[in-house]
Image: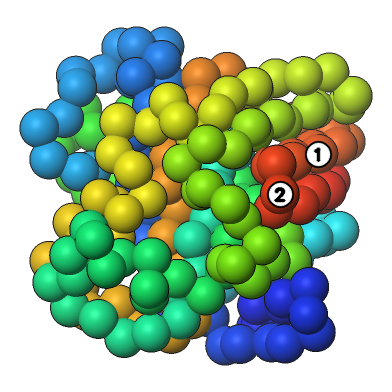
Amino acid sequence: MRQIKFSSGKTVNPGKIIGLGRNYLDHIRELGNAVPERAVIFCKPQTSLLEDGGTIILPDFAHECHHELELAVLIGKTGKKITAERALDHVAGYAVALDLTLRDLQTQLKEKGLPWDIAKGFDTSCPLSTAVPADQVTDPNNLELQLKVNGIVRQQGNTSQMMRSVEEIIAEISNYFTLEPGDIILTGTPAGVAKINSGDILEGSIEQVGTLKVSVT
């Protein structure tokens, strides 16, 4: 996936993919993690992107890949040290995303005090739907999210449950990284993450944003 597609037909080249961990309290609790004082930020490479209708390729160097349904924020204007009040001015659109995580490998790396980029950034680890323009979303901080695996609901939540709002996320990340057009921000996942297996069908949906459907090889 070398371009981000918009429902209007517009396409843009993807830039940085910046993920935010531990942004839903119920998800923090289900994994037994501590509530962070600062945002937990990580990055995925562009090769992790997978378009709607694509196939997730489970790597052979781990055995437990978890799904994480997320609202993706697409940046449309360059900014550094953006204030929360002006943050949405920098948003071009929104999309449905999956932040796939090799949980067993991540746990091993964390226990050794090592970075866990490999567990987050493997090929096809970031399925992304067609994006909708920002003006089609009334309030990104109040959207229903749902993920079904083989027709069964696994994750259900609302972006109002996020510990940091979309505006606060953009403001905090822009303190560390200059945000540029094409950058993608993943805003965290609600509770209900679980292992996916070969043959599974994943269907994600976010109110006003759209749907995402991918399979697992």
- Along the line of sight, the residue nearer the viewer: 62 or 161: 161
Q: Position of residue 116 (x, y in %)?
A: 31, 46
Q: Residues within 10 Å of mark 1 (few under 14, many from 20)?
A: many
Please say if 51 is above or below 190: below
**How far is the residue under mark 2 from the one under mark 1?**
16 Å
- Left or right: 66 in relation to 198: left
Q: Residue at x 29, y 60 (%)?
A: 170
Q: Is residue 46 visible?
A: no
Q: Is residue 114 left or right of residue 43?
A: left
Question: Looking at the image, which residue is at 51% across and 48% down?
Answer: 140
* Location of residue 37 (image quadrant): top left
- Give how far across and how far down residue 137 sits, in percent: 61, 56
Q: Quadrant of residue 113?
A: top left
Secondary element at image label 1: strand
Residue nearer the viewer, 214 or 199: 214
Q: How far across and how far down the image is residue 31, in percent? A: 38, 16
The residue positioned 20% from the left and 27% from the top of the image is: 111
Residue 150 tag number: none
User: In terms of sequence position, does the residue under pointer 2 or pointer 1 come before the other?
Assistant: 1
Q: Is residue 194 left or right of residue 109?
A: right
Q: Percent x, y for residue 115?
A: 23, 49
Q: What is the number of callouts on the image? A: 2
Q: Nearer the viewer, residue 121 or 130?
A: 130
* Residue 208 numbered mark, or none: 2
SS assignment at label 2: loop
Residue type at numbered disc 1: Glu
Residue type pointed to by label 2: Gln
Q: Is residue 115 visible?
A: yes
Q: Which mark is residue 203?
A: 1
Q: Is residue 71 above or below residue 13?
A: above
Left or right of 40 on screen, residue 108: right
